[in-house]
Amino acid sequence: MAIDMMKKVPVREQDPKVRATNFEEVCLGYDVKEAQDEASRCLNCKNPKCVEGCPVSIDIPGFIQEVKNARFEKAAEIISRSSALPAVCGRVCPQESQCEGKCIRGIKGESVSIGKLERFVADWARESGIKPKVDAPKKNKKVAVIGSGPSGLTCAGDLAKMGYDVTVFEALHKAGGVLVYGIPEFRLPKDKVVEPEVDNVRALGVKIETDVVIGKSTTIDALLEEEGFDAVYVGSGAGLPKFMGIPGEQALGVYSANEFLTRNNLMKAYRDDYDTPIARGKKVVVVGGGNVAMDAARTALRLGGEVHVVYRRSEQELPARVEEVHHAKEEGIIFDLLQNPVEILENEDGWVRGIRVIKMELGEPDESGRRRPVEIPGSEYEIECDTVIMSLGTSPNPLIPSTTKGLDTNRRKCIVADEATGSTSKAGVYAGGDAVTGAATVILAMGAGRAAAKGIDEYLSGKSE
Amino acid sequence: MFRIVKSEMLCENISQIVVEAPRIAHTCEPGQFVIVRADETAERIPLTISDYDREAGTVTITIQIIGLSSMKIAKFQTGDFLADVTGPLGQPSEFVNEDIEEVRKRNYLFVGGGLGTAPVYPQVKWCKEHGVPFDVVIGTKSKSTLIMEKEFTEVGGEHYFLTTDDGSYKHKGMVTSVMEELIAEGRHYDVCVAIGPMIMMKFAAKTALAAGIHTIVSMNPIMVDGTGMCGACRLMVGGEVKFACVDGPEFDASLVDFDGAMKRMSLYKTEEGRAYLAAKEGDTHKGNCGNCD
Ligand SMILES: Cc1cc2nc3c(=O)[nH]c(=O)nc-3n(C[C@H](O)[C@H](O)[C@H](O)COP(=O)(O)OP(=O)(O)OC[C@H]3O[C@@H](n4cnc5c(N)ncnc54)[C@H](O)[C@@H]3O)c2cc1C
Ligand SMILES: Cc1cc2nc3c(=O)[nH]c(=O)nc-3n(C[C@H](O)[C@H](O)[C@H](O)COP(=O)(O)OP(=O)(O)OC[C@H]3O[C@@H](n4cnc5c(N)ncnc54)[C@H](O)[C@@H]3O)c2cc1C
Ligand code: FES
């Protein structure tokens, strides 16, 4: 069958009705034939706009041409020059607003499915047992990386490739950051995808010490002064979940999205063979409209609930990826848009029995350029529910700044770091990812880790033995 | 993996484990806790550090068997390995970081109830080592549930007061009755630290606060990560939301909403109860922690 050059080769997905009851991956990815067909849609532009749209500047036309010609190993090699976690990025990057958003193909028809091709190449490489190589001579300098999220892993991997002796310190019992505790199995399989990507970083010689909370188990100052580290990278993530401060938030059955997702993803509460419990709500309200809210909603749905997403703006302003909203709707999540909670209602045992919301309308644009939601007086009503999941973003964890002498934070309490090199106000200490930007994306966190690895290398190369 | 160098049952349902955790032993202070994950499929549960040996690189935890996870940990034997021990978490007790000269001028009243005896121990020991005056009141159901008597006798001497609910050993009555007697005798206290079941802390705090004593209690809400990331441990303290794992676990008792906190703790009781029953038939669920009263 001839392929329609204007349209993406469709990707196989689990049927929405079936997947709404399991935690298996939703998207099944391309097979070899589909990948080659899709690759043949790439115009191989001289001046590729997609690369400009990629925060880590992957040579996109370059790897796609290799896919077209069935040289998958070469394709993997091209991607790995720019990205340490392609199987992850191929699945979770907001391609529609990055590479695919700029794709020339996309002007007249549909853009090339760059994300799905990246995923195909990365999965092929993993299944074929291809491991990244280290070729640099040992440098005899030690670098500590705090946090094993995408930012920390990228920084650690890059430094190891340059020959540094790298140890990652992770507070939780498992490496991966949000990739293991936040993003659900059905979007990003843990054993199949995340674990092997972490193992690839280990294969480069990086040591990962879990169960170490920097600022508690030891401090950055002690790592530098007592444990002989020459530099430190802080990739400690976004921090503490926010609550709304409305009455009833302490009621039983109110969770932060972080808690709900951590119980389910990291602690595997959805599986009978794990001990951690999770409340299986019958009717669940998720407050918020970002990726995190979508993940919480789709998780609650799979645990057997009827799920409503309550968001104060309209569909257009939903910060979540379009694909996630689309998937959520297909699975049967109900969107209650332009409404905002004002109170959580409790029954006599202290359990949630409902949530009172007020309807909103869009007014003038605010500083973010989005139209500001304004309450419609007298429009309050109650939604009956037994579980409420608050997904309102995070505020930075003060633990590291408060225990590190001379590490500056900004007005929003994020660590201040130079974008180009990751350097902070403290010599030898670098930072990046969500800890610096506030909650952002996997690819930006990786980009920051990569920039800081270069910054650290420059700093340590200048420093005498 | 964290090797257990000693594991013993202190009484029918309380086990004490000494575990190798050099980083924690090096930096921990009284008042802090660890999060333990027994094995690959276990929960992460918070347990107070009830002693530490910086040189040996070990910390001691004392576990009351009340459900599935505490039972799993309590079963571990000397030489076994716990999958994960993370910490030290939470803030050290207030006095640890205060001017020691000021602290020495005060008289402390420590109150431990039931399992709460264990977390009080490192604080009492610290005071003894730093020349801070104190009295310590320990209460338990009955002689058979008493723990750490030897340790307390050693550090407490004549400042150690013991009471049993049923009068089977020493004084008969609740910790609050001993507190009242000590206060009535004219003993003056500047600070009271009460640790035990929620209900005991609520009443001990009431007694101490009524006598005008600055009172600290140790809150034990449900926790998951213990690093501030999940918010499961949130409490209302003085009208503000606090995360017990980063801001606590010790708080000014006059600001704590005990009833609200007790309510939140009942969250997983039913589901867990079932998991527990599936794990072991029989009736080891004593319910004497005060949480499910
Ligand atoms: C539910 C959810 C869904 C998301 N979906 C997407 C998506 O689809 N696409 C996308 O691009 N982005 C998504 N994001 C955002 C993305 O995951 C983050 O931007 C990214 O993970 C940030 O990476 P990081 O390395 O900076 O931090 P994190 O991934 O947060 O990792 C930080 C790590 O540091 C550890 N740590 C923290 N403090 C300490 C300490 N003191 N000592 C030792 N270790 C410490 C933490 O335990 C954690 O493991 C999502 C986020 C969430 C929560
Ligand atoms: C800071 C802190 C220090 C603690 N120190 C000690 C200690 O030194 N010794 C000790 O025996 N216990 C201590 N606890 C309580 C201990 O963590 C719980 O008894 C334990 O989690 C119960 O787990 P379970 O599965 O055996 O019981 P279950 O009652 O079956 O547990 C059910 C669920 O509720 C949670 N849960 C139940 N009760 C509590 C509770 N009181 N605190 C926290 N989570 C609870 C568990 O995590 C689990 O998810 C402490 C708690 C906190 C927060
Ligand atoms: S236990 Fe998760 S924030 Fe305190």
Image (spheres, coloured by chain):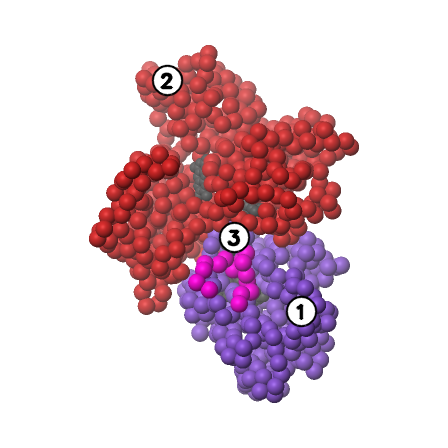
Chain colours: A red, B purple
Report the residue at 35% width, 59% height from top: A247
Report the residue at 55% width, 21% height from top: A78
Residue A293 position in % (x across, y down): 38, 44
Q: Are marks 3 and 2 on the same chain?
A: no
Q: Tell me, yes or no, whether the two marked residues, 1 and 3, touch with CB atoms within 8 Å.
A: no
Separation of disc 3 and disc 2 at Cα? 45 Å
Q: Is residue A29 above or below residue A297?
A: above
Quarter of the C terminus of chain B within the rendering = bottom left
Count of numbered badges drawn on the protein: 3
Q: Tell which subunit mark 2 falls on.
A: A
* Residue A313 located within the stretch drawn in magenta: no
Report the residue at 58% width, 58% height from top: B90
Separation of disc 2 and disc 1 at Cα? 73 Å
Residue A261 position in % (x across, y down): 44, 48
SS at circle 3: loop
Q: Is residue B78 visible?
A: no
Q: Are marks 1 and 3 on the same chain?
A: yes
